[in-house]
Amino acid sequence: MKSADLLQAISEHRLYLDGKPHGRILNLKGAALSGSDLSKQRLQYARLGGTDLSHAILSRSSFDNADMVGANLSGANLSHATLIGADLRGANLRKANLEGANLERADLGPGQGVVFISGERRVRETPTDLTGANLRSARLAHAQANGADFSYAVLKEADLSGAQLNGANLTGGDLLRANLMGASLRAARLTNARVEGACFDGADLRGAELRNVDLSRASCRDVMLHEADPQADDEAFRLRLGQHVDWIASNGARGRRLELQGASLAGFKLANADLSGAKLTDCDLTGADLRGAKLCLAQLDKAKLRDCQLAGADLSGASLARADLAGAKLQGAKLGPMAIRGADGRPSGRDWPTDLRGASLVRADLSGVDLRGARLEGADFTAADLTAADFRGSDHANAILGSAKLTGVSYDT
């Protein structure tokens, strides 16, 4: 956009804000304004979605209630700017200078972004990126920042009271003397964060990652620290599940692997959920709905899966040693080997077998199940329905098959 056109548009926007004739709301969606000087401007309610304002000078300008969804503000100078109630979902604020800025009630949650996976166009949630940003003395009271990336950001003396930071990444952040009173930080990542003098009074830190964080040097009156019981707090579990999906999609670069031990998830509705690689050892999933779920390479050792709905589920390469699957419905499920791929994504020529050693499958429905190459030593299939199941290449030494239905079973001759 030409400088003259930009100045004219801003002039008309001021008239719009003042309710004067010939006023028109500023609409710069998708405009290329990298490096522009828009300091000390009145830009409330402006439409700046997807605008490139990288390295722009925006200090002391007002963006209250502006639409800035997906805007590129990386390296921008927003010091002492006001962004009260601004919509910054999915924005790029990487290494931006927001010192003294006011982001009260701003929406810093995830936005919709387009990514290409193996050449296929997909729309997925993109977290707001504040990596390495300077937010010293900034005001983020009651901001919505669930899932936002604040890793290595400076939040010294910032006001985050009442902010929603569930699942946010604050790894390595500087939170010295920050105010997080009443903030919600469930399942947030604070590994190596500096919190000396910070106030966490009344904050919710259940399920937060606090490795190498010394809370003894912060104020923590009435703080909630203990891991939430997923059964009692379904919202906390859904948040963890979302992080796990992000972990899968990014090959571990983002998100967080779902790791639970001994948790009660009985009756949970997880049909078609992607739990590939999840660690759910000794968890109680009795009666859970996992139809069509992806559980490839999941660790479910000693898990309770009695009467579980697993029809069509993909358990390729999963570890179910000593799991209790009595009465489970596994019609058409995949329990065969998982092909192992190298770091370059190419097949390595090796397979990882599903492990059902010592598992109880009493009265389970395994009709049409793929058990090729599975480890079945000592598994109990008493009264199970194995009609048309494929046992080829499996190791079923000492497996119990008493009263099992074996019509049409495929096995090595």
Image (cartoon, rainbow, N blue to C red):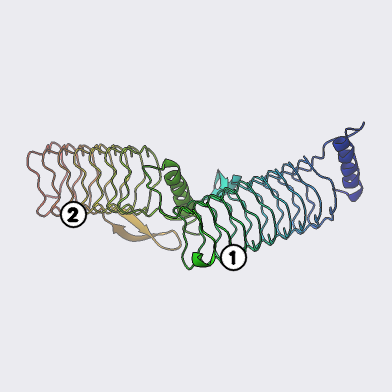
State the count of labels: 2
Between the residue at mark 2 and the residue at mark 1, the CA separation in whole angstroms equals: 52 Å
Q: Sequence order check: which comes first, mark 2 or mark 1? A: 1
Q: Which mark is residue 357?
A: 2
Q: Which mark is residue 225?
A: none
Give the camera-side residue of 133 and 352. 133
Label 1, secondary structure: give it: loop
x, y percentage for residue 375? 20, 54
Question: Residue at point 30% right, 47% down?
Answer: 315
Label 2, secondary structure: give it: loop
User: Is 332 located above or below residue 378 in the figure?
Assistant: above
Give the camera-side residue of 300 and 343. 300
Disc 2 residue type? Arg
Q: Which residue is mark 1?
A: 197
Give the camera-side residue of 304 and 345. 304
Give the camera-side residue of 228 and 128. 228
Q: Is residue 148 visible?
A: yes
Crowd rating for badge 1 (residues with CA inside 10 Å; few <14, some 14–19, many 20+): some
Q: Is residue 208 left or right of residue 44?
A: left
Depth check, mark 2 against mark 1: the one in front is 1
Question: Residue at point 89% right, 50% down?
Answer: 3
Q: Is residue 135 left or right of residue 204?
A: right
x, y percentage for residue 378? 13, 53
x, y percentage for residue 334? 29, 44
Disc 1 residue type? Gly
Question: Residue at point 57% right, 67% down?
Answer: 196
Q: Is residue 41 left or right of residue 259?
A: right
Crowd rating for badge 2 (residues with CA inside 10 Å; few <14, some 14–19, many 20+): many
x, y percentage for residue 359? 18, 50
The quarter of the displayed image where residue 44 is located: top right
The quarter of the displayed image where residue 15 is located: top right
